[in-house]
Amino acid sequence: MIFPILFTFFLLLSSSNAAVQDFCVADLAAPEGPAGFSCKKPASVKVNDFVFSGLGIAGNTSNIIKAAVTPAFVAQFPGVNGLGISIARLDLAVGGVVPFHTHPGASEVLIVAQGTICAGFVASDNTPYLQTLEKGDIMVFPQGLLHFQVNGGEAPALAFASFGSASPGLQILDFALFKNDLPTEVIAQTTFLDAAQIKKLKGVLGGTN
Amino acid sequence: MIFPILFTFFLLLSSSNAAVQDFCVADLAAPEGPAGFSCKKPASVKVNDFVFSGLGIAGNTSNIIKAAVTPAFVAQFPGVNGLGISIARLDLAVGGVVPFHTHPGASEVLIVAQGTICAGFVASDNTPYLQTLEKGDIMVFPQGLLHFQVNGGEAPALAFASFGSASPGLQILDFALFKNDLPTEVIAQTTFLDAAQIKKLKGVLGGTN
Amino acid sequence: MIFPILFTFFLLLSSSNAAVQDFCVADLAAPEGPAGFSCKKPASVKVNDFVFSGLGIAGNTSNIIKAAVTPAFVAQFPGVNGLGISIARLDLAVGGVVPFHTHPGASEVLIVAQGTICAGFVASDNTPYLQTLEKGDIMVFPQGLLHFQVNGGEAPALAFASFGSASPGLQILDFALFKNDLPTEVIAQTTFLDAAQIKKLKGVLGGTN
Amino acid sequence: MIFPILFTFFLLLSSSNAAVQDFCVADLAAPEGPAGFSCKKPASVKVNDFVFSGLGIAGNTSNIIKAAVTPAFVAQFPGVNGLGISIARLDLAVGGVVPFHTHPGASEVLIVAQGTICAGFVASDNTPYLQTLEKGDIMVFPQGLLHFQVNGGEAPALAFASFGSASPGLQILDFALFKNDLPTEVIAQTTFLDAAQIKKLKGVLGGTN
Amino acid sequence: MIFPILFTFFLLLSSSNAAVQDFCVADLAAPEGPAGFSCKKPASVKVNDFVFSGLGIAGNTSNIIKAAVTPAFVAQFPGVNGLGISIARLDLAVGGVVPFHTHPGASEVLIVAQGTICAGFVASDNTPYLQTLEKGDIMVFPQGLLHFQVNGGEAPALAFASFGSASPGLQILDFALFKNDLPTEVIAQTTFLDAAQIKKLKGVLGGTN
Amino acid sequence: MIFPILFTFFLLLSSSNAAVQDFCVADLAAPEGPAGFSCKKPASVKVNDFVFSGLGIAGNTSNIIKAAVTPAFVAQFPGVNGLGISIARLDLAVGGVVPFHTHPGASEVLIVAQGTICAGFVASDNTPYLQTLEKGDIMVFPQGLLHFQVNGGEAPALAFASFGSASPGLQILDFALFKNDLPTEVIAQTTFLDAAQIKKLKGVLGGTN
């Protein structure tokens, strides 16, 4: 009967596996580096680290843009740390809009789970690529390019956006310009917008100066 | 009136943008390299290159595993070439199963769009991580590790899997072992399975030897 | 006398070097892939492939923004193909402005060679980082974030921008919004700008719709 | 006499070198991140950090598979941290077998130092690639694909496996399936193996359920 | 009046941005890993972290080689940590020389800001690529290859070198050989230089043995 | 009897695998890009593409340095294209020397298969790391740093060097300086070597000027 010997062999061999890094669940309280957060100690990793339920809840679209974005990036979902992937939920009520924005750190694929979404991005040569997406359609937005999504139907729309990074970033154009203390004259000089237009949107978004 | 001069300036500047590589839509008929396919000529790129409708159609689950996987990898969706991202649709009828498999080239995040899915992966230290996922739940499967999905409810389930590569690969364990001409004795020697078990599954899956 | 034998040895050994890829000068007429252009045949590579003189000439700033950008990206300077680096020259006449823009593919370090430049970028949390740069000062603009440069002095300014990619890309905000046929209503809906403002800038920049 | 000045110059210049990161010897007790372990302080780095003698000792093959794998991954050989490379020793007694396994994090090149080894891998399209390797032969196993090695001769065999990662990982198929508490019914459902076969191998390898 | 609601929406959404990693300013006192230094806490990041004035000051060229290199690598300029870019200033008095050296971690683009510089690199097939560069000319030196710069004119020269890494490294050939305690006989054996030549340069540069 | 249906299902699913890129065997006659050579058509890939026998033959050490290097880089072994790994054989007769050299594109791990080898590298801060390696010992040489190997025993030595790139490159210091037409005065100026020493080695190695 030789099986017990096999067992012994495998125990020895697998001891070398202990340090293999299959994954690196983020310890959000430990140092972060350019490649992501420090890893939780292997002994404290649980299945819950790889699962996230926050996207099952519809975002609150009772706001002026009638839209909500719910991210499952590394900050919300530590299991994706270092794995080059993350996801977000997008709720668009009727008339809902996700205004022009970019993700500096990753490309995005959007999949429509419900409703109709008009989406578009603009390439560096200024060509716009626009499409009306129905349930099940997907569209890719290349990394760093300005893009938007708008509910294009008569019913609420739901979509999921997946990203090729655990931390894709999100820069919303209107926020970057109008929701801070950038002086109006600097914005006018660097966007060619009229001062009145800038001040109006600063007022809406809470910007100053 | 100075605006026409501005226009001129911008035309000159933008001429340098022509060669900027925002994206690289795959020309599937041109040479492929380690980083992906050759790019389509910019002038022939259309919005359709960035959109794919194939995931809107339910896969045919009228088969023994009562499951279907519909990929939107670079081969089906050339717009993701070089962008480090892709997606697939997973249909699981009642009792449906996606058997143990790996993606050698990327990590995966699964999002359940409908129904209940029991999913799991096994780490290098042989720890299994299993979870029952409800609608809206997500789970991450680290790159290269064995994992599976099973319909865990009384109704059909639908999920979308997103990947951190345009070409994540897919190696299904049973196929790799039993759906080819690998000699039974070699499989027995390298898996410890009984020859009778191997021959049985070769019979099912179409393997020989 | 043993030296001739050494010579022979080295000839043999170096024959294996022939295929070593130290560099990959772009053949701009050959297929391009996600990692860059195909390489010129080694036998046709000359020192001129690694040298570029186009940045020695001041750009023409006789335009409304009184500024000019002269790139030495892979399209102009094929020697940087695959090497993860490129550079551009920035001329700013008195009052000159490089309006808000992003580089989707790389971070930038700007070095002021002459004059005074007010520069700034906005982070994802909408914090603006602004600085007046004098000759010899450098500033880094992280990948994908909106930033600008303005001549802040009473004399022409000259700067060089270096990038961590041979093809960093360049998306100018005003172009992306106003220098194409994106419908005014879509822009209004996705930027909150007034239609009159949009139409005014479309008129300036040559946009339609 | 100008040489002392040269000396002075060089001292000044080299002071800037102190922070140059030529290498990053792992401090196995410090935080680990997605790119590897934290670096030892430069002042405490010794030549021994770059040298490892553990592969000079034959592994113990007195076990049922008559094989032993001795790794020099980052956990055993901290000097390779961050350098994208590692190595392992493989001893195969007569009749020895390294069963089907994958390395999720790197491709492997095997070089036979002694004896005869039958090796093979299976591609995603289920094509097996098998070869009998003699002393001095090398074979490459692409990242993440199932592969195995078997002693194919009448004498002990010795080989070295090199990997394109300091932490290539190792998932042994039989362990992942049978050496843990994965329920037999789940394994049966996701592998199509018979329950009796599963229970038999669980018994051999120490699995439960 | 609906704008206040918009404001509310945006506040909620932007809260998810807090963890977005636009940049990772180095905390030089915290652990360093293979991808760079740990990040400063976001709350303590200031605009000064992204700006560096050290390159505005001419290096001291009152030394035998009549040259000075002033780096703005991550150790001097923490803002470039993780961003894949850095820069250095090069001052060459008349007759100044930067002797043969390599950057193990990045390619370099040199731009001449003043004067004339003769520069060159040697490829793996031993072909030298030499060029006399005038003001405004740029030249690229591929990663890891030996290269040099010499003032080729009758006036001081100034150049800026940009690199595709925050930590490109710098190995100066003469230092590596002669400015340490490498035994003369080892150097002779591995370079074919005469012992007298080696001892002479050790004397100049402060080497021993 | 339901098994035939399973078979059908699997055939359908696997059809999507056809385009999965597990590997990219180099077509050395097709275009090369920054990431490597174009891939052979999948249908023409054979097991021989993944196997190489050239390292089983001792290199000819009947030369003055009594050493030979036999590479299995992508140019000799197309199967490693894009896989980030390669290997070389090193034969050192008694008294054999591999002179100072660098690999610009990868780190190296050397394993001694026979005999004694004295090896060393020099870090950027000019610290030499030297070690005498016996059979089975391994040593790592970080990317781009100058290093050497010398037979340190009374018998022939054999070693294998593995690299973290399919195309690690090889720049031999003496070749780069003395085996081409670099003018003696330029070498003298950029190395501080005496002209007589330079001319002597040019004579040995076949350099001119």
Image (cartoon, coloured by chain):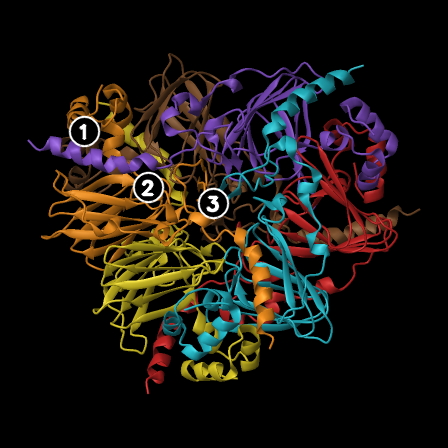
Chain colours: A purple, B brown, C red, D orange, E cyan, F yellow
Q: In the current view of this chain or complex, which residue is farthest to the right?
A: B1
Q: CA distance from mark 2 to mark 3?
A: 21 Å
Q: Which residue is mark 2?
A: D103
Q: Quadrant of the N terminus of chain E?
A: top right
Q: Secondary structure at mark 3?
A: loop
Q: Which chain contains the residue that carries disc 1?
A: D
Tell me which amino acid carries mark 2. Answer: His
Q: Earlier in the sequence, mark 2 or mark 1?
A: 2
Letter of the chain that mark 2 sits on in the rendering: D
Q: Residue furthest left?
A: A1
Residue at 42 percent across and 80 percent down: it is F205
Quarter in which the C terminus of chain E is drawn: bottom left
Q: Which residue lies under the disc numbered 3?
A: E34
Towards the viewer: D46 or E79: D46
Q: Nearer the viewer, residue B186 or D59?
A: D59
Above or below for E135 versus B131: below
Query: In the rendered view, would you say D43 is above or below B66?
Result: below
Measure how far apart labels 3 and 1 are at the Cα level: 37 Å
Mark 2 Cα shell of 10 Å, populated few (<14), some (14-19), many (≥20): many
Q: Give percent across and percent down for residue D191.
A: 26, 28
Considering every residue shown, the one lying at the far top of the view is B154
The residue that label 1 is drawn on is: D205
Front residue of F41 and C169: C169
Badge 1 marks a residue whose secondary structure is: helix
In this view of the protein, can residue C82 be seen by the observer? no
